[in-house]
Image (spheres, rainbow, N blue to C red):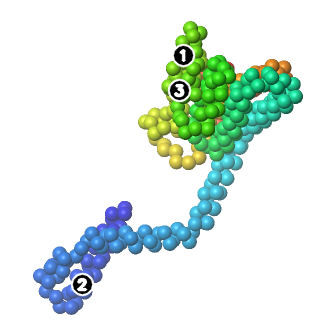
Amino acid sequence: MAKDYFMQIVDDLLRDMVEESIQKGMSEQEIIKKVEDINFEKILSDLIDEGSKCTLQDLRSKIFEISAERKASAASFIAHQECVWGKCFAASDAMYILAIEAGNDYIRYVEENVSIENRKERQYTYLCLQHIHGRICQEFLEILYLMKLGFADCAYARWRSMYELCCIGEFICKYGEQIAKQYYNQSETEEQFYNWTRGAKGKDGKEIKVNTFGKLQEVCDIPKEWKKQYQLACFVNHGSPQGTFKRLANGKTLNQIPVGHSDYGITTPAEHSAICLSWSTRLYLNIFLHPEGLVQCKVLDAWIDIIRDLYAETKKEAFKETEEEPPCPTST
């Protein structure tokens, strides 16, 4: 269409020039020579420059109008999401509050009931798991907002970080205080990768070499089902063919290309983020014995089933789908 538009302009310019030349009494050969001397590339370049300048001026004059239309469209979608998934979002919100309150209660319990000597023995483990839990709580909330906005793939990519943090927490708990200290110390450097895992030893007394996340999952005995889910999240997060053509927001169809909000695909990040939130809370609250914390962990584990059931029921009602989500462990 753009080509036809520019060709029409060039045709009009040529017609006007030829008519003007004829009126001036120029011969046919003179007119042909004049046409041959025309720099069409420059004309096209000038037209493009002028066209872009006019378009920019027009857009700048309408910038608030354009933005208002987008805001109205987004508000309409958010209202739709709330109408369809509202009870699910409420359950996720409640789980977030439960995890936050459990963490705050635990801080008070440790300060008031755990001796300074006992705290010192596991100070870095406590510090690392505390910050990991806090980061996971925030990421859970980020995922919830992304789901409310209809960005399932972005939410699942964010879940990838939650899962990695849970596995790191498992590694720290399994291999001890020195590993936790190294994890903290590395935060003060520019070091990357898994240098903080050095010195971890297996049951045979040999040092465990961890240089990939896959190896970290292996030594932490993470169920193999999670590895498949993590691979899917990696596809979503990176510029992979799978992440391009098999986006969560697109379902099983390839005849549409999502470019914004979508109400499809949020059940997977919703369920998986709930599992990781409970998982991280359990790791954190079990550093020092806390009876009330054990109750809170059990409640969060049970809440996963509430999340799973609500989102599955809503998906079935909204999309008339009966197939189950990709299998993953109900707990860790």
Give the percent coordinates (x, y) of residue 88. Answer: 72, 35
Kind of residue indicated by mark 3? Phe
Residue 130 horizontal side relative to residue 29, left or right: right
Q: Nearer the viewer, mark 3 or mark 1?
A: 1
Residue 237 appears in the rendering: yes
Indicate which disc residue 207 carries: 1
Q: How many marks?
A: 3
Disc 3 residue crowd, few under 14, some 14–19, many 20+, Cα 10 Å: few
Kind of residue indicated by mark 2? Glu
Residue for badge 2? 19
Quarter of image, res 201? top right
Mark 1 and mark 3 in contact (Cβ < 8 Å)?
no
Secondary structure, mark 2, is helix
Give the percent coordinates (x, y) of residue 192. Answer: 53, 34
Give the percent coordinates (x, y) of residue 186. Answer: 60, 33
Q: Is residue 175 above or below residue 261?
A: above
Quarter of image, res 198? top right
Judge by depth and name the residue closer to the eye, 284 or 193. Answer: 193
Residue for badge 3? 213
Q: Quadrant of the C terminus?
A: top right
Q: Which of marks 2 and 3 is in front?
A: 3
Judge by depth and name the residue closer to the eye, 154 or 194. Answer: 194
Q: In which quarter of the image is the N terminus?
A: bottom left
Q: How far apart are marks 1 and 2 (CA)?
A: 89 Å
Q: Which residue is drawn at 57% across and 20% down?
A: 199
Secondary structure, mark 3, is helix
